[in-house]
Image (cartoon, rainbow, N blue to C red):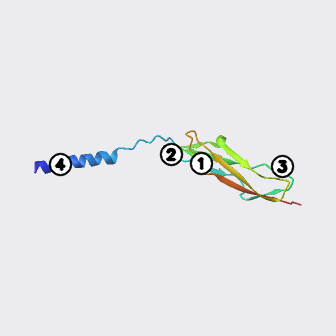
Amino acid sequence: MKRLFLSLFVTLGLLMLTTHCKKENTATSLKPYIEVIGANPTNWGLGVEYEDAGAKAFSITMEQDTVDISDRIEMFHDVDVEAEGTYTVTYNATDHDGVRAETKTRTVNVVITK
């Protein structure tokens, strides 16, 4: 009986250790996210210099703190204000740990205005 109790005690102890030990996580943040500011899609006047409304980027730490990383946004666009058409603006950002956000886009329709 003592042997069974000891075996059960050891097994239970090992089970508790394995379920309560945290796996070491070397990342200090989760995947960042981007919020596109303003209308999407948006219409833009033919011949008017394009000024994008921008975006905000945030990183979430493992402690669930939100960190503004908008200064790390990379924006690319092919908007040609001299030609009617539909164009795309893309945004991405990488946090301080090198984790890249999911790319976000804005559609810009260059149209004739009165």
Determine the residue positioned at 85% across, 52% down. Answer: 48
3 left or right, relative to 27: left
Identity, as a three-letter code, of the amino acid under mark 1: Ala
Q: Along the polypeptide, which appears first: circle 1 or circle 4?
A: 4
Q: Residues within 10 Å of mark 4 (few under 14, many from 20)?
A: few
Identity, as a three-letter code, of the amino acid under mark 2: Gln
Can you say which quadrant of the picture contains the C terminus? bottom right
* Label 2 residue SS: loop
Front: mark 3 or 2: 3
- Name the residue that disc number 1 marks: 101
* Label 1 residue SS: loop
Front: mark 2 or 1: 1
Measure the C-alpha gap from mark 1 to mark 4. Answer: 50 Å
Q: What x and y, as percent, mark residue 67?
A: 58, 42
Determine the residue positioned at 17% across, 48% down. Answer: 7
Q: What x and y, as percent, mark residue 101?
A: 59, 48
Measure the C-alpha gap from mark 3 to mark 2. Answer: 40 Å
Identity, as a three-letter code, of the amino acid under mark 3: Glu
Q: Along the polypeptide, which appears first: circle 3 or circle 1?
A: 3
* Label 4 residue SS: helix
- Name the residue that disc number 4 marks: 7
Q: Residue furthest top?
A: 96
Q: Quadrant of residue 112?
A: bottom right
Depth check, front residue: 85 or 42? 85
- Tag on residue 64? 2
